[in-house]
């Protein structure tokens, strides 16, 4: 645990400028859960803050308390830049490098604000003034809960804060299925239920709101674009740009697709490669010993966690698939 937090609740209350809360581009449940969890907490504490995220995000997160107050950086860059420039504090949640917030990274880097990093990813870059980081924690949302309990005032948490934090817990742990789930994670979930969080309501809001196009694309992927490699230990799925456009896919629709490969008996590592136009994006998931983060960093300009990572390539879809099939052979010792 890296805990260098120096500012307490009274200091945050007495600031003269703005508090900005941000997360990585294309924010997922943990990113939006942590930002809005902290935002709602600050509201309860009488602290004015703004949530600014680099890009849009999946519609199944729009129900989160405070969602209507979220601002997308790309929609109003000048106004957002002014807020960042005049901020006293910038909370950077669920990312370990300023490149993960795209163009916002330059403004944050140039800001005179105190930058507070709360994250659980490996190898965080040195861009912050204070940090609350635990590599390998289940989620940034779990760390937000612990940050509030350790450095702020836990009595100001309520059901809205709990709903946001619980969202990050279940999305980043695969509903508590992944190996990152610890006894601390489960205790956090129990404490959130004591605040009034109803797990089945959150689950339905997140996972039972599918567009028909999403399910049709998933069926197409599993039926036509899924290969089993390395004697049944690796699942490789892929989607072309034409398929993405044909099924009218929007942000968040392919979230979780990569996990289906791990549901096949004997598979230890699952990959999903998607042609997104100028870039080919990749998601990697694994069980047991396979190091997705190392595999991604060494071959596809990416990183993440041991059992969950992402990457990108400019080589085109076919070349990227061929490269994957070639380099995966170098990691047979982990399969």
Image (tube, rainbow, N blue to C red):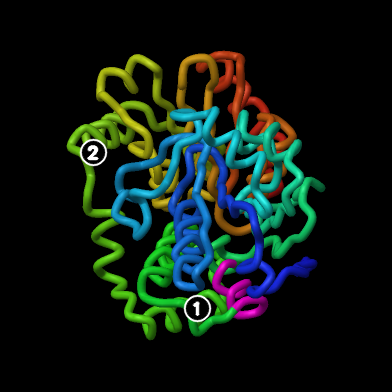
| Number of numbered tags placed on the structure image | 2
In percent of the image, x 32 and y 35: which residue is there?
222
Residue 215 image label = 2
Eyeballing the image, is 10 above or below 80? below
Magenta stretch bounds: 144-152
Say which quarter of the image contains residue 63. bottom left
Where residue 35 appears, as percent x and y from the top left, is 51, 56
- Which element type, helix, strand or loop, lies under badge 2? helix
Dot 1: element: helix
Q: Residue 332 versus residue 134: which sits nearer the camera?
A: 134
Asked if residue 163 lies in the magenta stretch, the reply is no
| Residue 167 percent location from the top left of the image | 40, 62
Q: Residue at x 68, y 34 (%)?
A: 107
**Viewer-nearest of discs 1 and 2:** 1
Picture layout, residue 107 above or below residue 90: above
Q: Nearer the viewer, residue 230 or 69?
A: 69
Q: Nearer the viewer, residue 108 or 266?
A: 108
To which residue does mark 1 refer?
Answer: 188
Kindly report the secondary structure that dominates the magenta region of the rendered protein.
helix
* Vertical order, 192 against 109 (above or below): below
Look at the image and tell me whether residue 96 can be seen: yes
Residue 199 point in image, percent of width and height: 31, 72
Decide whether residue 151 is among the magenta residues.
Answer: yes
Q: Residues within 10 Å of mark 1 (few under 14, many from 20)?
A: many
> Which badge, 1 or 2, comes first in the chain's sequence?
1
Instruction: Report if residue 228 is visible in the image.
Output: no
Task: For label 2, count other residues whose C-alpha is less than 10 Å away and answer few (under 14), some (14-19) or many (20+).
Answer: some
**In percent of the image, x 48 and y 60: which residue is there?**
39
Which quarter shows the N terminus?
bottom right
Q: Is residue 290 above or below residue 297?
A: below
């Amino acid at each position: 645990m890296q805990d260098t937090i120096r500012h307490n609740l009274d200091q945050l209350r007495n600031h003269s400028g703005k508090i900005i809360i941000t997360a990585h581009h294309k924010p997922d449940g943990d990113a939006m859960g942590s930002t809005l969890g902290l935002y709602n907490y600050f509201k309860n504490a009488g602290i004015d803050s703004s949530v600014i995220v680099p890009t849009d995000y999946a519609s199944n997160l729009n129900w989160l308390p405070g969602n209507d107050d979220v601002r997308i950086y790309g929609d109003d860059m000048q106004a957002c830049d002014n807020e960042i420039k005049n901020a006293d504090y910038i909370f950077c949640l669920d990312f370990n490098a300023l490149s993960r917030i795209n163009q916002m990274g330059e403004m944050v880097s140039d800001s005179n604000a105190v930058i507070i990093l709360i994250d659980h990813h490996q190898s965080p870059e040195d861009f912050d003034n204070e940090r609350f980081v635990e590599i390998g924690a289940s989620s940034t949302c779990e760390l937000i809960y612990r940050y509030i309990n350790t450095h702020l005032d836990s009595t100001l948490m309520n059901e809205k804060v709990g709903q946001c934090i619980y969202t990050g817990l279940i999305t980043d742990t695969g509903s508590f299925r992944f190996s990152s789930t610890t006894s601390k994670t489960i205790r956090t979930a129990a404490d959130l239920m004591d605040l009034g969080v109803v797990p089945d309501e959150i689950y339905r809001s997140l996972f039972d709101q599918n567009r028909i196009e999403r399910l049709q694309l998933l069926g197409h992927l599993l039926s036509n674009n899924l290969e089993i490699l390395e004697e049944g230990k690796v699942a490789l799925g892929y989607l072309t740009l034409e398929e993405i456009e044909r099924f009218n896919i929007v942000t968040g629709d392919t979230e979780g697709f990569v996990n289906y490969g791990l549901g096949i008996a004997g598979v230890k590592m699952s990959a999903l490669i998607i042609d997104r136009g100028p870039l080919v994006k990749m998601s990697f998931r694994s069980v047991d010993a396979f190091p997705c983060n190392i595999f991604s960093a060494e071959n596809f300009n990416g990183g993440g966690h041991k059992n969950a990572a992402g990457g990108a390539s400019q080589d085109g879809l076919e070349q990227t698939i061929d490269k994957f099939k070639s380099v995966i052979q170098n990691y047979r010792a982990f399969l």
